[in-house]
Image (cartoon, rainbow, N blue to C red):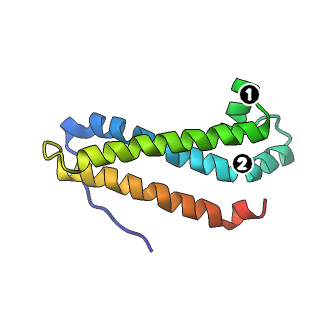
């Protein structure tokens, strides 16, 4: 099932909207990287690469952290971004100085976070690893 959300963010709110949504986007991206790590690590090895385009790999390199610690850090970052974003959505929900479309967009990103998590947990291409 797909849902179409016909929204138009006013030009004068666009930059603000993207800034408000940033923690939500970060949570989405990090969740994907956490769950896709094993597949991406496998695919990189198969391709003969010594790197992986994934946040886990970046954390491991930047912090000289073992894989398990990098995953823990990633989970912690996801939680931090989700909490920050939930607060932003809650604060904007009844802020009638902002357009309805902006507020609806932020709500849609919030719902996308939980949907992305469920999809990632059950995604067949990630589960085989």
- Crowding at mark 1 (Cα within 10 Å: few <14, some 14-19, many 20+): some
* Numbered disc 1: secondary structure: helix
Q: Report x, y in % for residue 6.
A: 27, 60
Q: Report x, y in % for residue 40.
A: 74, 48
Q: Which residue is mark 2?
A: 37
Q: Which residue is mark 1?
A: 61
The reply to whether residue 25 is in sight is: no
Residues 12 and 67: in front is: 67
Q: Report x, y in % for residue 84.
A: 41, 40
* Left or right: 125 as drawn, with respect to 47: left
Give the distance between the C-alpha atoms of the residues marked 2 and 1, in whole angstroms. Answer: 15 Å
* Left or right: 114 as drawn, with respect to 119: left
Whether 58 is drawn above or below 28: the answer is: above
Whether 85 is drawn above or below 65: the answer is: below
Image quarter of the N terminus: bottom left
Residues 40 and 129: in front is: 129
- Crowding at mark 2 (Cα within 10 Å: few <14, some 14-19, many 20+): many
* Numbered disc 2: secondary structure: helix
Do the CB atoms of the residues marked 2 and 1 lie less than 8 Å apart? no
Q: Earlier in the sequence, mark 2 or mark 1?
A: 2
Displayed quadrant of residue 59: top right
Residues 7 and 80: in front is: 80
């Amino acid at each position: 099932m797909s849902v179409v959300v016909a929204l138009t963010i006013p030009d004068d709110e666009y930059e603000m909207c993207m800034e408000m949504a940033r923690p939500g986007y970060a949570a989405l991206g990090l969740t994907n990287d956490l769950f896709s790590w094993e597949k991406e690590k496998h695919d990189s090895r198969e391709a003969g690469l010594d790197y992986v385009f994934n946040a886990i790999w970046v954390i491991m390199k930047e912090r000289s952290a073992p894989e398990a610690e990098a995953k823990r850090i990633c989970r912690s970052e996801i939680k931090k971004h989700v909490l920050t974003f939930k607060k932003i959505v809650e604060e904007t929900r009844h802020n009638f100085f902002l357009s309805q479309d902006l507020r609806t967009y932020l709500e849609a990103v919030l719902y996308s976070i939980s949907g992305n998590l469920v999809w990632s947990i059950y995604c067949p291409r990630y589960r085989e690893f």
